[in-house]
Amino acid sequence: MEMFNYYLKLSVRNLKRNRLFFILMISTLAVGVGVFLANIAIIKSMANDPIPHKSDRIFNVTLNIWPNENPSARLRETMRYDDAMHILKNEIATNTLVHYQSKVYTRDINSDNLSRYPAVVRATTPDFFPMMDAPFAFGGAWTEDHAKQVVIGDSLNQQVFNGGDSVGKTIEIDGKSFEVVGVLKPWVVKPMFYHVTGTQAFDISDDIFAPIETAMDSEWAINVQSSQTEQIDSVSDNRGKNGFFIQAFVQLDTPHQKLAMQQYLDNYSQHRKEQGDFLRANDNRLLDVNQWLEHHNVVDERMLAFAIATSLFLAVCIFNASSLLLARYHSARFETGLRRAIGARIKDIFYQGLVESMIIGLCCAALALVFGWLFLKISMTLFPKLQYTSDIDASLIIFGVIIALTTSFISMIYPLIRSCQTSLSTTLK
Amino acid sequence: MLNMNNISRIYRSDTIQTHALRDFSLDVKAGEFVAVTGPSGSGKSTFLNVAGLLDGFDQGSYELDGVNIQGLNDDELSRLRNEKIGFIFQNYNLIPDFNLFDNIDMPLRYRGFNAAERKRRIANALEQVGLASRANYLPSQLSGGQQQRVAIARALAGEPKILLADEPTGNLDSLMARQVMELLHTLNEAGSTIIMVTHDPEQARSVGRNVQVIDGQITDHSVYAPEKNNAPIEVNA
């Protein structure tokens, strides 16, 4: 411990004596680590398991439906109202939900302020909340399919009602009134796996959750990539017609449930095929959350390419820092030689270098976290969808410190080896 | 104390082999003060580097205080340098931004002494060289002679078996050189074994034994009377 303190004292002395040099070296490493960290933060948020404790038990339901036989047509991710209702009727899954997304304008019906706030609506079924572990602050879900009731998110509750228990209050949506029966706590799903189609995987959570039947009755527009193969005049007109806009998820807690659900879907396909529908081959899939995210390439390939680039950039920074240190050790070879001559072992010189690299690494880590945060903010301008999800959290801070210490140590190794290889007699002459 | 037998040291480059030492044999007893002289490039510094374990050798055998040097690893060589050898360099080799205390403290740290023991030894060493009141001075605040005395204090603090001095007065004016030589003589009279490389024939004659090195070999081996009367009493070619 006494020698550690001595090395610490020597290192601090060296840092003070070569202040500008070390600022340059630490900055070089910190830029590399910071860029790398920002990139990892983005990839981590993209590759995040949004519901880790049950991501292997929640499945997206995909039916190979389309009313023609085009074999090259890709698997459909949305289904018709009738198909969704059939899936909803299953008695196999622990929870089943169907949903579509809409956008509306809303306000507190009793407010003197006539301004309406834009809000994203999740038209869904009550099982949405237990399946997603959506946390209620007040109240709960609706119980009637056509109820004029909604659950609102924390953000909208703050905006419209200034927060608090808003259960029982009434909001106006597109000229109609709806009772608030539940208010969620602040809740973010990263990525929003239940709606990864299009570019919405990193949207912030929904503002309003409403019964799907009510949403269709109210003609709330379908805000998803939808298709139709016949004339459909309104949202509610989708019932019984070939309008593809609903997604379905089931929670299957056991392998037996999964097998039974697969059979249920295949039986349904077969039945529809016999009725002249479902002309394509049976290809009904149950993809769990991570399979579903992978199927949609949620981790942007550009980010993976960027990760390679930032890794190479970090390597260049380490190389530069190492070159700087080599020059520093070259200029300090007299002191190293003197220490060796009066009794320091090679390992003593290495220990001293290690302590110095630790101090450099910690300074670098502090600066790298600042740079990382800045680079992340800059990256948000390139990937605005990520601005509500990517952050440098505690695990990334620890990771950043480890990377900074490691890079500092790697930078130090070669100069240390070189300084110990110098001939003592030549150095001291 | 120091026993070298047929030591050879060859420096090799791509095209040239230089025999810095060839069949070099020397036996130094405890308490002796030996001056090593010779022209530039004769091999006297190489001898001192080999003797001080700063450089290796190609052939021969070397025993320092009963320890055979051959085959020792870095840890063992470093321990020997630290415990048995005190170096005094021509250009003092003090660390400029360490005060005297911290400069002398360095070898004691690697020896593993605790703080109290280090403090005691540093105080004694500074007392011996007459700089006890200047422990907090920086080397730049001292004259050349005083800096060399600090270097001697650093060598003494570890209470080594042998002091190796490489032209210790080479950078000093005559007055300071005389003071440093007097200090070395005092140390020798107190029992220290000293080997000193020097160009100065007068200094060489002032010590008990003079070894002349030419072309990496000992060519003259004179022993002088301890009274420093400069008259050789025995000569071994």
Image (cartoon, coloured by chain):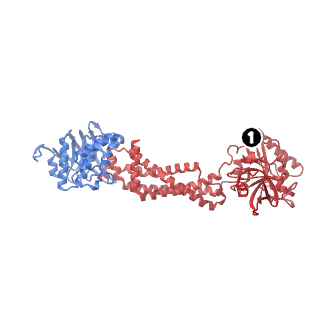
From the rendered image, report the letter of the chain displayed in blue. Answer: B
Location of mark 1 (residue): A253
Dot 1: element: loop
Front residue of A208/A349: it is A208
Q: Position of residue A323 (x, y in %)?
A: 44, 56
Left or right position of A123 against B93: right
Q: Position of residue A365 (x, y in %)?
A: 51, 52
From the rendered image, report the letter of the chain displayed in red. Answer: A
Left or right position of A114 against A38: right
Left or right position of A21 against B190: right
Residue A414 makes an appearance in the image: yes
Image point 81% across, 42% down: which residue?
A: A263
Q: Position of residue B112 (x, y in %)?
A: 35, 40
Amino acid of disc 1: Asp
Q: Position of residue A129 (x, y in %)?
A: 75, 47
- Res A109 → quadrant: bottom right
Q: Residues within 10 Å of mark 1 (few under 14, many from 20)?
A: some
Residue A314 makes an appearance in the image: no
Front residue of A28/B102: it is B102
Number of marks in the image?
1
Is B152 placed above or below A173 here? above
Front residue of B215/A307: it is A307
Which chain is mark 1 on? A
Left or right position of A397 against A201: left
Screen quadrant of the N terminus of chain A: top left
